[in-house]
Amino acid sequence: MKNHDSNTVIKVAIADDHALFRTGVKTSLSSRKDIQMVAEAENGMQLLNLLKHIKPDVVLLDIQMPIMDGLTTLPEIKKLYPDVKVIMLSMHNDHSVISKMMEIGANSYLTKESGSDMIYEAIRGVYEQDFYFNELTNKALLSGLRTKRTQESSVPQDVQLTEKEITILRLMCEEKSTKEIASLVDLSPRTVEAIRDKLKTKTGTKSMAGLVLYAVKAGIVEQH
């Protein structure tokens, strides 16, 4: 797991059709020694072309863009570059949109009003922990759950999780890093990662957000 290591520089790309917004983000991050902006694009198509040559750790991806928007681009990035973390950006905080994004693999979601500290936190968060939840994503995931619950009261069936898997899932929902979980349950980080992958397979989820959703649905963690 990557630590808060001052020597680790996180490479970031941004795709947004507003040049002014891109410049604002670049400027606000330029003072951070551990962030390096490596690419910028004005739409998803341009970004995907850049990704053939440049490998960022984290992509800031605007939802509304001409030619190829963020919703279309996100699954493409995840398919071609599964290790790249994606933070979605939008002017709106529409719960259903946020839930949809998290379900198709977004690692976090920020509104464009987010200050530079929040953007920085989110970049570090997804880089180190795989995902960065904030009030917005949590509200969206939970409200998405509530509407789903009323539509179909089905709890995910016949998934048998071991005690250890449940413990690890709970810790993951508490936003503990792989390293922290490993020391808490006395396993190697690699084993914890293997269990996390196994959990994804067992529960049929693709992303960390999907796992958290599953845990809430199945009553493994309490809803706040």
Image (cartoon, rainbow, N blue to C red):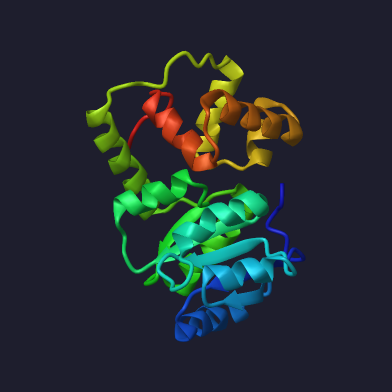
Res 161 quadrant in image: top right
- The residue at the point 57 percent across, 69 percent down is 45
Q: Where is residue 83 in the image (x, y as percent from the top left)?
A: 67, 51
Q: Position of residue 93 (x, y in %)?
A: 31, 60
Res 115 quadrant in image: bottom left
- The residue at the point 43 percent across, 51 percent down is 101
Q: How many marks?
A: 0
As displayed, is residue 73 above or below residue 199?
below
Res 64 quadrant in image: bottom left
Q: Which residue lies furthest to the left in this view?
A: 150
- The residue at the point 74 percent across, 63 percent down is 8
Image quarter in which the C terminus is found:
top left
- The residue at the point 53 percent across, 52 percent down is 107
In the image shown, does 106 or 49 lie closer to the viewer? Answer: 49
Q: Is residue 53 left or right of residue 108?
A: right
Q: In this view, does 100 lie to the left or right of 149?
A: right
As displayed, is residue 138 above or below residue 45?
above
As displayed, is residue 23 above or below residue 210?
below
Q: Position of residue 181 (x, y in %)?
A: 63, 34
Q: In this view, does 204 lie to the left or right of 185?
A: left
Q: Where is residue 124 in the image (x, y as percent from the top left)?
A: 59, 60
As displayed, is residue 73 above or below residue 25?
above
